Amino acid sequence: MNYSYWELKEWFTNIDFTIVGSGIVGLNCALELKEKHPKAKILILEKGMLPQGASTKNAGFACFGSLSELIDDLNSHSEEEVYNLVNKRWKGLELLRKNLGDKNIDFQQNKGFELCDTEDFFEKCISKKDKINSLLKPIFKTDVFSVSENIFGFQKVHQKYIVNNFEGQIDTGKMAFELLNKVQKLGVKILNNISVENFTETSDKINVKTNRLGFYTNKLLIATNGFANKLLNEKVQPARAQVLITKPIKNLHIKGTFHLDKGYYYFRNIDNRILFGGGRNLDFKTEETTQFGETEIIQKELERILKETILPNTSFEIDYRWSGIMGVGNQKKAIVKQLSNNIFCGVRLGGMGVAIGSLVGKELAELIN
């Protein structure tokens, strides 16, 4: 297609900053860049009709780690590293809420509940509860984790839950809408259905080649998380997460965010429905993909747990199924760094995009002097 003089002049000429990816990181990066450089011309490129990766395809958990996840993290990270991970996630959630407002993203702090499949696993976690609470006390000023009875009537699990008293939930569709709205009101241009194929850097500019056209930009910021390896040589492994949601259920009494099997399964209430996702641990290799879709082995297991554990005495129907692509690695810390004179990246959010995405986006923008 030949673009007009007006189109090329307005959208693709004299661009100061080009951001690849219109998810939570890319949009927060744009917000921060506009704050620092109000007169800058900023362009965001998004390959999907909507943010393509995980920003609007996740479960909407405003979380920073269940007790068993944090215990597991201590096996591969130092206490200081785990403390810093949680601190960053909490600060990221605070920034998200401050930027957009609790009402606009339907933030609710209904607490998080970890279900344990055996008494041994429950006791193993509880034995480390005081240690983790002590580690996190400087952040939260009080105990994060406590214990509760089985008030929701779940079956085939230990009859006590481990409670995260600070965990919440949001509506990620509303979050993305608010971010898009806020960024566009500041004059940032967003183009959808356009994919970056490659780029080359000269001394002071970058030539960006897309599936639509090529253009020059002064700075390039890559915020594609699980899709990062298509453009970068960084240690980011794509990880697909499959999700389903029920049709509305009358008198649904389940309220909160719930974790099962070290967080590999997770569910919550939303609009009188149960949203349930996970099962990546059933087939890690197949789920190391940037292809969206569902598999029979995981969907069957989600339905089985939903029927036998979560809603054992309630009839339900599945309404939708979908998947999102996360970016993970051998470390939980996100990759936020300068790659060359004019190229930067903020990727590998480790399944914690809601928590750290706002902060990673801000930090990405702050790399530019």
Image: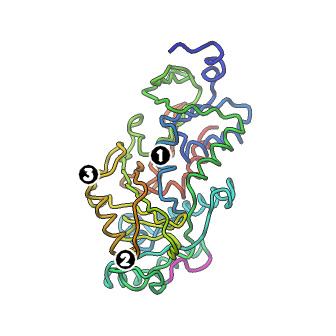
Q: Of the residues under marks 1 and 3, which one precedes in the sequence?
A: 3
Cα distance in 3D space between marks 2 and 1? 39 Å
Residue at the (43%, 26%) spot, across then down: 198
| Stretch of the chain drawn in magenta | 141-146
The crowd level at tag 2 (other Cα within 10 Å; few <14, some 14-19, many 20+) is some
Cα distance in 3D space between marks 1 and 3? 21 Å
Q: Position of residue 23 (x, y in %)?
A: 54, 44
Q: Position of residue 223 (x, y in %)?
A: 51, 41
Q: Secondary structure at mark 3?
A: helix
Q: Position of residue 314 (x, y in %)?
A: 41, 75
Name the residue tied to disc 2: 312
Q: Position of residue 288 (x, y in %)?
A: 31, 48
Q: What residue type is disc 1 on? A: Val
Q: Nearer the viewer, residue 233 or 62?
A: 62
Left or right, 273 with respect to 308, comes to right
Which secondary structure dominates the residues rendered in magenta? loop
Please state which of the two labelled residues, at mark 2 or mark 3, is closer to the viewer: 2
Name the residue tied to disc 1: 347
Q: Let me know if residue 282 is in the magenta part.
A: no
Residue at the (67%, 61%) spot, across then down: 102
Name the residue tied to disc 3: 285
Displayed quadrant of residue 9: top right
Q: Of the residues under marks 2 and 1, which one precedes in the sequence?
A: 2
